[in-house]
Image (spheres, helix red, strand yellow):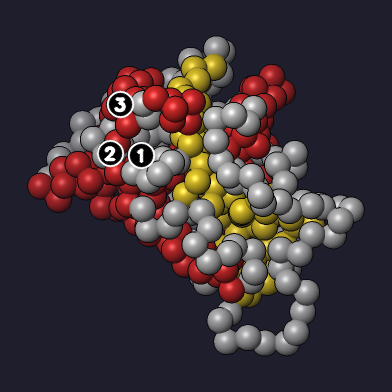
Amino acid sequence: MRRALVALVCCLPVLALAADGGETRQPMCAPSGQDVRVIEADLDGVPALVRIPPEVRMPPIVLWHGFGPPDSEAALMSLLPLDEVPAVKVYAGLPLFGRRALDDPGALAKRQSEDLATGVYQPVVMGAAHELPRVAAALRREGCLAEGQAIGLFGFSAGGAAALYALAEREVPVAVGVVLNASIGLGASVAAYERATGSTYAWTPESRALAARTDAAKRAADIAAGSPPPAVLVVHGARDAMIADEGVRALHEALVPHYAGAQACRLRLEMVAELPHAMQTEDDVAAVRERVGHWFLRFMPQAGDGPGCAHG
């Protein structure tokens, strides 16, 4: 977690997606056949940048930013445009960030210092995951997502924690999940906060219950449920000084028994040498883009081509 929490507000025209119709217009996710289109959208109250490639052959991918750089929809899209993946990319804003930021610029940091669990983690990280059904429903109304179709999911840092929690809660079908330098739950985020601030968090019965519910390693069976289970890639920087790698290693170890036999290739932990928590150099960005893009290309379902280990 970072003590400085900065939000970036995008400046593109907003497209409100309402269930009650409105004037006739081109479907939001309709590809142009030539150019990448970017739309700033309101997905049932969730602000998002929607990046539409020239050709769409896969279900949408929802991506969450973190508390620190990239800490906005625009910043994450700049680093991970994933234009080689023929899917609509939906860069969704976290609650209390961007257009939904609190009026007082220091309010979020104050909430974090007062109670990281109930003041920030629950409304932002868990809140983002519980907003996912609304995002998916809005995408279905716009013709971007077919009924019953599974999405792709990506999250960085706190956004990665939201992605893991969403995978465990299973409110929306997910075919492929990728997390980068992710906290695996409230316990890991508290440990990171204590390291960063030198303070000791005061646990309560409520926060301990939240920690148990969000512990991705303990919820491995929930994450891996399904036939086939979601294809999960965990990418972690060997030089990440904010989020210790013990958490993602424990998560991977807990998931392995659920990916036995023919499904073993659908789970991978990649430790990236020299990668810090936040991508800082062109090499950092290139290393992450290659891994994330390849995983989605390999496992996202395409028309007439079911997901499987034979691809890639």
**Residue 13 image-quadrant placement:** bottom right
Q: Is residue 65 visible?
A: no
Q: Which residue is mark 3?
A: 257
Decide: few, some or many residues near mark 1? Use Cα within 10 Å; few <14, some 14-19, many ≥20.
Answer: many
Residue lying at the far right in this picture: please name it. Answer: 34
Q: Position of residue 49 (x, y in %)?
A: 65, 57
Q: Nearer the viewer, residue 193 or 186?
A: 186
- Specify the amino acid type for callout 1: Ala
Decide: few, some or many residues near mark 2? Use Cα within 10 Å; few <14, some 14-19, many ≥20.
Answer: some
Say which residue appears at 26% left-offset and 47% top-offset.
117
Total number of numbered discs in the rendering: 3
**Residue 212 image-quadrant placement:** top left
Q: Quadrant of the C terminus?
A: top right
Q: Position of residue 70 (x, y in %)?
A: 58, 39
Q: Quadrant of the N terminus?
A: top left
At mark 3, the secondary structure is helix
Question: Considering only vertical position in the picture, is 112 above or below 309?
Answer: below
Q: Is residue 150 visible?
A: yes
**Residue 102 image-quadrant placement:** bottom left
Say which residue appears at 39% left-offset and 50% top-offset.
166
At mark 2, the secondary structure is helix
Q: Which residue is mark 2?
A: 221
